[in-house]
Amino acid sequence: VQLVESGGGLVQPGGSLRLSCAVSGSMSIADINALGWYRQAPGKERELVANFIGRDFTHVVDSVKGRFTISKEDAKNMMYLEMHSLKPEDTATYYCNTPLAAERNLWGQGTQVTVSS
């Protein structure tokens, strides 16, 4: 399975962005459990931001709860992260990944999000 992130950019504090994750390969997104979004800020460890529990239930970490929403379109093999009320501390490289690949330290290129005035 290949995962390609896009949609990052420079945004002012309080702004919004939508990140996309394109899934391709031998599995459809509907068959992937616990697909999620992770991020790594400069000088910090990579952390989980939001993920699917099973196929349809979602989990969002407390630091972004109420501001970030994870979703997917099975028909398009796409996953999204809607981000609102962005803060400078949200600045990071964002990755989509599965827990198994994350445990094996297998990551894509990610997409950079910079929140700055």
Image (cartoon, grey):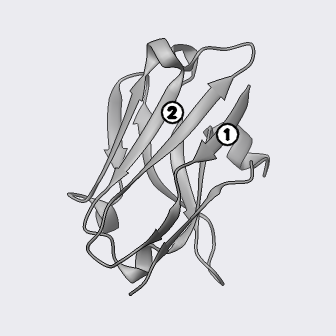
The C terminus lies in quadrant: bottom left
Q: Secondary structure at mark 1?
A: strand
**Neighbour class for label 2 at 10 Å: few (<14), some, many (≥20)?**
many
Q: Residue furthest left?
A: 66
Q: Quadrant of the N terminus?
A: top right
Which SS class for mark 2?
loop
Q: Is residue 79 left or right of residue 83?
A: right
Q: Quadrant of residue 44?
A: bottom right
Q: Amino acid at mark 1?
A: Val
**Residue 31 location in percent, x, y?**
56, 14
Relative to 29, 69 lies left or right: left
| Disc 2 residue type (three-letter) | Ala
Q: So how many labels did they put on this image?
A: 2
**Is residue 55 toward the left or the right of residue 86 in the image?**
right
Mark 1 or mark 2, whichever is nearer to me: 1
Q: Position of residue 82 (x, y in %)?
A: 34, 49
Looking at the rendering, which quadrant does residue 47 occupy?
Answer: bottom right
Q: Which mark is residue 94?
A: none
Tell me the quarter of the picture where residue 45 sits: bottom right
Relative to 28, is 56 above or below? below
Q: Position of residue 8 (x, y in %)?
A: 53, 58
Instruction: Compute the Cα span from label 1 to label 2.
Output: 17 Å
Q: Mark 1 or mark 2: name the one nearer the start of the chain.
A: 1
**Label of residue 34 in the image:** 2
Residue at 32% across, 70% down = 86
Callout 1 touching callout 2 (CB < 8 Å): no
Q: Is residue 88 above or below residue 58?
A: below
Question: Is 9 above or below relative to 106?
Answer: below
Report crowding for label 1: few under 14, some 14 to 19, many 20 or more residues within 10 A (C-alpha).
some
The label shown at residue 4 is 1
